[in-house]
Image (cartoon, rainbow, N blue to C red):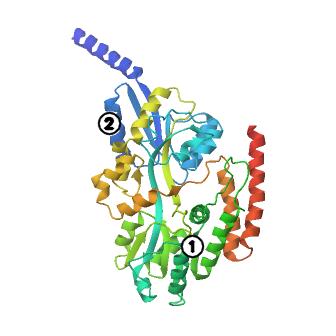
Amino acid sequence: MRRVLLVTVLLISLLAVVAEGKVVLKFWNFWSDKWMGPVIEEFMKENPDIEVQMERLTWSDGFNKIVTAFAAGDTPDVLELGSTWVAQFAADGALLEVDVSDLLDKYNMWDPVIYKGKYYGYPWVVSTRILFYNKELFRKAGLDPEIAPRTWDELLDAAKKINALGDDIFGFGIKTGQYTTWQTFLPFAWSNGGSVLSEDWKSAAVNSPEFVEALSFVQKLTKYSMIDSNLNVRQAFMQGKVGIIMDDVGRIKSFAKDAPELDFGYAVFVRPDKLWSKPTQFGGAEVIVIPRNTKYPKEAEKLARFIVEKRSAMAISSRIPTLLPADKSVKDDEFFKNQPGFFVIMNQLQFTKTPPAHPKWVEIQEILTQYITEVYNGTIDPQSAMDMAAEEINVILEEFEEEYGE
């Protein structure tokens, strides 16, 4: 009996030593444990010397929790960030630079993780927006219900004709809000060759002819548009009161489910009627980064690379098919080929862009939102608005250069 007890104690001690010998990584992300749990289990099965402790963040306060963690120096080893958040943390030296030279040709949408020419993360899942239109309203307005607007002129013409159908009918839907205003306007500017910042990020470019021309066009659209929150514009489209809107690709399925009577079509975004122009849209991404103060950079990198693989990203994409793995091989995946609108989505993903990954983007987009809104409201002309916006943005850029000595 004593011998059995001794052996048992020795086994327990041995197991404790083995457990203590494992590298323990903390992984924070925004998705259900039911979705990500099997991914982490598979990783630990393939890497028995690493234990991963996962914590789910919420969309409501996740960003604040991340900021607090970095400030306190108590960060996880691997972390999910939104595509517009990376530059802020990279500029503060909070993220580990990673070597991705062997992955550049394998994944899409690297721009959000690049800061000052260096890479600070890995793209994980990506999405974009497309044009949706009401076929019944097209018929009533004398438009071909099988052909979506392809150019600015065609969009404006369709919006006018649909808007003329009645006082409670709007030709186009312009979504506004804290983040929505600039996200829904910038595709017009990008498609016209406009940019928010100069190429070297030293000065604002919002008062350039290309940018102002785009804002002037959208100002024309406002006469025939419903201008309201994201939710209200979307709801009005589902009720058949708005002819054309811009929305995320996930609405292909949700419109069919939530508004079964709605006869709608979808297509890539519009572009200016210029030979060189492209139907550029806002491209969003969730990315995986490694905080700089991790004690286990090699193991953290191994986990990060595993998470962004297509087989792991499918934990999200198989449930939300319009959030595609960043892995380029998705174009040949039978699962996605069978999803509604897949080829439209893939076509639009060829023409996506993200806002400048500048650490002060949050402040810059607030200025953009303010002046774009004033133009929509008719209180200021596009050129004057963007001249004033450029002045304020330049102050932010100059202060950043002084603060960081760059």
270 w.r.t. 160: above or below: above
Question: How far from the left and from the top, in percent, is residue 11?
Answer: 29, 16
Residue at the spot x=50%, y=85% of the render? Answer: 162
Taking the view exactly as shown, the residue that stands out farthest to the left is 1
Mark 1: few, some, or many residues within 10 Å (few <14, many ≥20)?
A: many
Q: How many marks?
A: 2
Q: In the shown orientation, is residue 203 left or right of residue 75?
A: right
Q: In the shown orientation, is residue 238 left or right of residue 198?
A: left
Question: How far from the left and from the top, in percent, is residue 161?
Answer: 52, 86
Q: Is residue 330 visible?
A: yes
Residue at the spot x=35%, y=50% of the render? Answer: 330
Taking the view exactly as shown, the residue that stands out farthest to the front is 275
Q: Amino acid at mark 2?
A: Glu
Label 1, on which residue? 174
Q: In the shown orientation, is residue 298 left or right of residue 43?
A: right
172 w.r.t. 253: above or below: below
Q: In the image, which disc is placed on residue 42?
A: 2
